[in-house]
Amino acid sequence: MNDAPKLYQLCSTCAAIVEKSSILRLVSLGPGIEAGYITSSQPQNREFYEHLTAGALLLSANEGCHLCSILYEQYRRYYYKKDHGRAFSLVIWANLRDARNDSHETKPVHLALGDGDDLLHDLLLPRLGISRPDTQSFGDSEPRLAIFGLDTSSDEWFNKINTWLNACRNGHAHCHVTAAGAQLPARLLDVGTLEQGTEIPRVRLCTTHSMEARPEYLALSHCWGRVEILRLTKESSDEFFHYIPEDKLPATFHDAITVTRRLGFRYLWIDSLCIFQDSAQDWETESAKMGDVYRCAVLNISAVWGDNPYAGLFTPCQPLRFKDCVLQIDARPVRIEAYKPWKRPHGPLLSRGWAFLERLLCPRTLYYDRGTLMWECVQHRAGEQSDDTLLQSEQVLDDWFPKSYVHDIAKRLRRSEDDKHSEYGPKQLGMYQPWYIFLENYTRQEFSKQTDRLVAMRGLFRFIGCEDSVAGLRKDIILPELLWVTYPNSYNGRSTEGSYIAPSWSWASIDKGRYASFIFLLSATPNSLIGGHWQHRSIQWTAEVLETNIEQRPNGQVAGGHLKIRAPLIKMDHHPEQYGGRWYPDTCDTNLSISGHFGLLIARVRGEHLYMDYVLVLMRVPDVADTFRRSALFENMRKNPYNKILFQPDLSNCQKSIIYLR
């Protein structure tokens, strides 16, 4: 489209649905049952209309239908199995309970794409709220459409980015990074600077060790995908230090160079062009710095929407997808609420483990999404809005962790030396609840190489001031951190990738098909969901770690190791279900035979009405004395009289064993 899109324009399909809908007509009359809301005695609280295929939705959106634009955006963001030939129904329904309570958080009336006429089972996408605007003067003047040019590479957008960047660097104390002690990447791309009347400079690779002053640079985050791209190798290095032809670079790299130059910077870091891709030694050296590389970058350019580097950053603006659509029904307004992109971006990149940490460690990130972009720093975030204000970001939204969250974690975990050696009760563990929420989400992230999981974590540990970690666990609080459990994602089992990742007692040993949850540590706090039940409990740590012996490389990768633990150990003669409590196998096999298994008692919790033992279920390593591997976590409720006793209530006379846990 050459002309700016018009608000509230509908295609013939959407216009016919709006004309037919009795629910929308009732909403236009105003809130409350007395104004015409559907009541429980009226079963017609759902309406289904045959709509368009996904491909036709896109075509209609491109032709300017406001409602189709909103609907296609929901489809694009939440329904990843793209099938443009699939037909949808449009579902409009009223929530009967909420219709009586205008103060309820959930909107009383919703709209979404559905499948057929079965809303309960086949609803595909999140609901779009429908409401009646407060103003009675709709139509008196045309609202302004927030749009900065017709492309995210426009001068208007770059002016706005510079405004955000300057406001952050000059006025945000929490976004200031102290570079003292931080390591620079060995190499950066020198993209030159744009000066009026000069030719576009050449791109070349340069080393940082010879620079007199610490360089200011930007860093790119992107999906590699399964495509061939230009990479730094031993063979290409001489050419790269002289000249890198931009026409051979994928679109995302080329656009990132453009962003760097237009924001007035000279240096850019891109992993595949700044780390030798055919040198394991260079990868180990540079990956050990990765946390510092992103923490000290002025800005992180995040290529959110592309699934490979050829997608590019810049896209045409499509503001209709993000702007509420106000319909006229019998001269009365009804509002369809659109997705707001400045709340959080969506895209393939944001499920990647490296990108998860890159955006959190860098003080500022610019997210290039399809049709728009978003700014986030530690103190604020902003997007394409009519009022153009900066939005505060302090809470986790739909598993989206703002930068301020990880900074708060760092403050919590930087404890005094005296506190490091204190006994960990509910109050002490409660201080670290945000860390375990964060860590659980991190274990859900995807890595192309599972061995990178601990490498990436090293950068986070450096950021929070925890240099003394072992296989992804903090050494000073290692006993509580042994009590993780796993749940399935889409695959199952421990790592089968062939290379060693971590010892069995580390959450990092679980393959990409499962994620770790620190259920004990999350439920051990007064503020947890069951905090009221456990508020006055006490925790007795029955195990002691005598030795940690880990073969850990400088970049955090683990080659082997064990824990030497002293704790009550008993052979398990019955299936875990017969002992009572909860059984959490480390694999998907819930019928795992316990023949030859042992139970190692780590902690005993006493509450007002309940006693709980937390037990690591172990398998003996063949032909190695006193050596075991973890296979499950077991919660044994001792108060239940129907449960078999695993460990006696009185442990004062219980003999403890010394074992090695691999």
Image: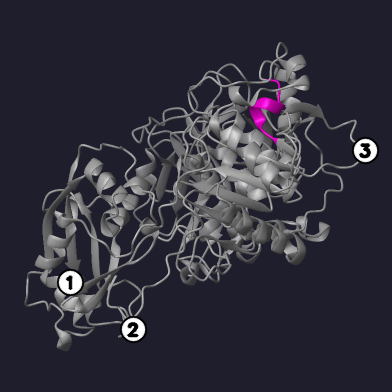
Determine the secondary structure under disc 2: loop
Pointer 3 local density, CA inside 10 Å: few below 14, some 14–19, many at least 20: few
Q: Which residue is mark 2?
A: 135
Q: Amino acid at mark 1?
A: Leu
Q: CA distance from mark 2 to mark 3?
A: 60 Å
Q: Nearer the viewer, residue 144 or 488?
A: 144
Q: Quadrant of residue 592?
A: top left
The location of residue 84, given as percent across then percent down, is: 25, 38
Earlier sequence position, callout 2 versus callout 1: 1
| Residue 13 vertical position relative to residue 607 in the rendered view, above or below | above
Pointer 1 local density, CA inside 10 Å: few below 14, some 14–19, many at least 20: many
Q: Nearer the viewer, residue 410 or 649?
A: 410
Pointer 2 local density, CA inside 10 Å: few below 14, some 14–19, many at least 20: few
| 464 left or right of 184 in image | left
Q: CA distance from mark 2 to mark 1?
A: 17 Å
Q: Which residue is mark 3?
A: 212
Q: Which residue is mark 1?
A: 24
Quick check: can you spot residue 478? no
Q: CA distance from mark 3 to mark 1?
A: 67 Å
The location of residue 653, given as percent across then percent down, is: 62, 49
Earlier sequence position, callout 2 versus callout 3: 2
Q: Residue furthest top?
A: 235
Q: Residue at x 74, y 67 (%)?
A: 171
Quick check: can you spot residue 210? yes
Q: Of circles 2 and 1, which is in front?
A: 2
Q: Which mark is residue 440?
A: none
